[in-house]
Image (spheres, grey):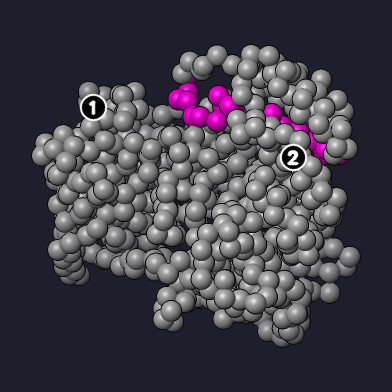
Amino acid sequence: MTEQLAQAFRLCGTEQPSPPSRILRAGTLSVEFDNGALRYVRVGGIEVLRGIAFLVRDENWGTYTPALENLRIDEKPEAFSVSYRGTCADANSCIVYQARIEGASDGTLSFVAEADPQTDLLTNRTGFVVLHPIDVAGKPLKVLKEDGSEQLAVFPDYIDPRCPFTDIRSLSHEIAPAVWATCTMEGDTFEMEDQRNWSDASYKTYVRPLRRPWPYTLTKHERFTQAIRLRVSGDFSAGTSEDQDSPIRLAIGEEIGDMLRIGVGVSAEAAQHAVANLELIRHLGPRWIVCQIDLRLGHGQTELERYAALAGLTGAGVVLEIITQGKLEPEGELQPVAAAVHAIGLDLEAVSVFPVQDMKSMQPDAVWPPMPTFEETFAAARRAFPGVALGGGMASYFTELNRKRPPSAALDYVTFTTCPNVHAADDVSVMETLQALPHTIRSTRAFMGENLAIRIGPSQLGCRENPYGKATAPNDANGRVCLSRIDPRQRGLFNAAWTVGYVAACAYHGVEAVALGDLTGPFGHIYRQADFVQPWYDQQHGPTIYPSFHVMAGLSRLCGATLLSVETSVAGTIAAIAARKVGRTTLWLANLTLRTRSVQLSDTTISARIVHLAAGQFEQAATDPSFMENSVRSFEDRVITLGAHAVARLDFD
């Protein structure tokens, strides 16, 4: 393994490096060109659009990665242009498209694609998507409809389960006082969805309304053309952009509440093999575990016995997540599970029940298949598990909870999970999903009530179950794949940084408890060879654990601590969480980017103890469960430097 590949492995768990991007500028206009798509369209340093891309999606909503040929980039002070030939293909289907991008110093931008299917192509969506950034939530919007009428509106503040706007020709929003950006779409019918539903940090406008049948077939050699055009109107003076070389200022503030509890999901397979990792699991120290009983798979007493043994070894509270077969009399399905729980002597902290019909996504206002009502399911659960706290919501994602909201009065807490690679699997998009979590939590409270506790998880980088297609996507090449159970970044520093960011977002927005990942398996924090082949780990002679193991163990030990506020001068690049316990203040930091970042803690030198979890410590951390305790050193400085996806913990007495 070359050093370049080794670095990619340490960061993202795969030897496939992340494709490089390039910043293109024309006067005050700047864009990031990333494997055929555009990110971060800015005018005068202000983000106007989060992205523009021509996408091809299969019948399970999986997104093809385009192969680019004949790439030409011409950049001048007042204009730039890009052209290339893109190909999206698998073993059965292929489509090619010619793309041309042009930008000018007056803020105008165009992206045109001429597509030619080389075979018949079964697709759920093929064409342009335009992303507006998450920061426009609640701000004014002008919608020009296809019939020529104009609608004055706002971007949804709370996450909208329905398409807020349809039949769109153009969208205009104010990017500065009296300065408007207008994005025009051509070549098909466009509509908008609130993509925060899937934890994406954007509002997405896309081709082909969901009211039309899908999947649909693009016929061989029936060519089509689509275009996206941007213009800016009004008197505009350039703003200031972030200086990425300047340290990010960070300040720890006052006590604001209690630290949330950290847990993991435990699949039946992971529980079966837990006995081989007892010491590691004790060191991980989850405070609660979500144990799934899936009646579709015939789970029962055997699985419950494994969960009971695991609970006894860890002392973690057990939440039993039951997937029923959705029979109209749910009590008949739940009573045998409850009887087995009683016979085994498994002490439950809580139980949550989800009929199988809820495991597949439905469009808002669609007619659901015959199934028990929320009230019938919850009442049956109360009778089967008297005195046990009851959670409800969705075992799938927030999307489904938002589309089908349970009665809060019947519940002790609401629960859901998130999946960060539903729409895009590249590193930047996945990490950006952390920005949507506060919106998700705030929206949940809006429709479930301010006083109902929220528990999130188990969430992880991979896709636990695909509510939108027949199955999760395969990932034999160990790459970055949408809606796949296998996400290699689970095993790299990327997941360690993402975990700090996820916990911080949940903690600072009042979530009671969060569960992330699993013990072993594709979502695990501990490596087990039977799960998949990972030659580097197989060659080790000691414990083989992933970077996220250390983060989860450290944050779990803060249970019972007092949460402290943290403020940073730049959002979206550094995650931070601080807490005080037994007279000691602990600060966790994570670099959410590939670029080395500096964090300034004070104007004067401070004294603390620090430990870094970075690429240079990867091999040691993978073989030493106590790495974060054994690698502590004194810190006498005011600035911390964090490499790509590096994590640091500081302790102040």
Residue 450 visible in rendering: no
Magenta highlight on residue 204 = no
Residue designated by label 2: 302
Residue designated by label 1: 146
Is 497 situated left or right of 192 in this image? right
Q: Residue at x 69, y 29 (%)?
A: 353
The x and y percentages for residue 430 are: 48, 54
Q: Residue at x 72, y 67 (%)?
A: 587
Q: Nearer the viewer, residue 125 or 153?
A: 125
The x and y percentages for residue 214 are: 32, 28
Identify which amino acid the numbered label 1 is placed on.
Glu
Q: Residue at x 63, y 73 (%)?
A: 622
Q: Quadrant of the N terminus?
A: bottom left
Is 57 situated left or right of 623 in this image? left
The x and y percentages for residue 109 are: 22, 53
Q: Earlier in the sequence, mark 1 or mark 2?
A: 1
Q: Quadrant of the C terminus?
A: bottom right
Instruction: Tell me which segment is drawn in magenta.
Output: 347-365
**How many C-alpha atoms fall within 10 Å of the one at disc 2: few (<14), some, or many (≥20)?**
few
Q: Nearer the viewer, residue 276 or 457?
A: 276
Identify which amino acid the numbered label 2 is placed on.
Thr
The quarter of the picture where residue 24 lies is bottom left
- How far apart marks 1 and 2 lie (CA) works out to 59 Å
Disc 2 element: helix
Q: Residue at x 38, y 39 (%)?
A: 61
